[in-house]
Amino acid sequence: MTLRCVGQRCQRTIRETVEVHGYGYRTGAAIRVRFRPACPGTGIVFVRTDVPGAKPISAAVGNVTGTNRRTTLGQPPAQVEMVEHVLAALHGLKIDNCLIEINGPELPGLDGSSRDFVRVLCAAGLRIQKAVRNIWAATEAITIVDGRGSLSLYPASAMELRASYLLDYGQPSPIPAQRQSAVVGPEGFLNEVASSRTFLLEAEAEALRGQGFGRNTSPADLLVFGTRGPINNRLRYADEPARHKILDIVGDLALFGEDLAGHVVGCRSGHSLNVALVRRLRETMELSSSSVREASRAA
């Protein structure tokens, strides 16, 4: 099982600095996020401006320290939680280099989707950079399995990444079984994925509130499913939960640090499987790159 480089594209950053303001789901704190342009090769980097002397945290899978309901980067006191929605916005728009300043421990929840992040990033404008970004594809299927969940990357049939998700919580879940698929590129992400919101069951929401979560959040701010469907809210798409699972996959795949071509398919998967697949892909890519270098030296 190997990955091979199948192409390249120019790197991109934003043209100007923009901000987003909101509240954190866990802390309830008011959070300001500032997106700044960055030089080629910088990648996506988070900086905690509220922690004196905090070191920058690259959005790389080696910096992941938590995957319970959200993806967390870095170590206390300078870690950053729930990075997946902003990473999905950047990855979906193919923005490769960006400095993200944040004055709190978590990204704001906003409406539970990537929509507002996408809005400000598009308003900032995009700048093409001279440096290139590699595009990798698997030579055979790569699959991660955990219990009833699985996540796979299949070989590419085109120079694009498609993400599909099969959601099925069984009976008698108020969330019906559903399936969705989208191309992970600016057009597909904007039109099919970006505005899909975080979802959870009413019992889960109550348990989390009992742990101190959601102090500035109500069911109207994200999708909370009761026995009759969303509470005090309406679906944007009939299959919005499956679309949000794709959003999470897109965000977590940004931790690979390069582009992928192929078809990633998730079934009952979440952040832990997403990150596990990225770890496997990084290991495979590094082994493949090492083999190519050795072959070149031998020749």
Image (cartoon, rainbow, N blue to C red):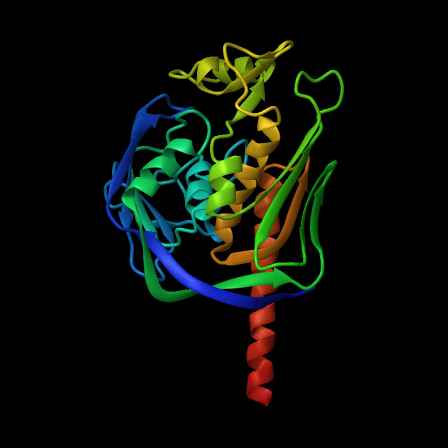
Q: Residue at x 69, y 22 (%)?
A: 176
Q: Position of residue 102 (x, y in %)?
A: 30, 37
Q: Residue at x 43, y 39 (%)?
A: 83
Among the 4 quarters of the image, the one containing residue 24: top left
Q: Residue at x 56, y 59 (%)?
A: 282
User: Considering only vertical position in the picture, is 288 above or below 171?
Assistant: below
Residue found at the very far bottom of the displayed protein: 299
Q: Is residue 7 left or right of residue 263?
A: left
Q: Position of residue 58 (x, y in %)?
A: 39, 51
Could you tell me which quadrant the C terminus lies in? bottom right
Among the 4 quarters of the image, the one containing residue 158: bottom right
Q: Is residue 293 visible?
A: yes
Q: Is residue 167 left or right of residue 282?
A: right
User: Considering only vertical position in the picture, is 267 above or below 261?
Assistant: above
Could you tell me which quadrant the N terminus lies in? bottom right
Q: Position of residue 237 (x, y in %)?
A: 57, 25
Q: Position of residue 125 (x, y in %)?
A: 30, 47
Q: Nearer the viewer, residue 135 or 143?
A: 135
Q: Nearer the viewer, residue 210 or 256?
A: 256
Q: Is residue 51 visible?
A: no
Q: Residue at x 66, y 59 (%)?
A: 157
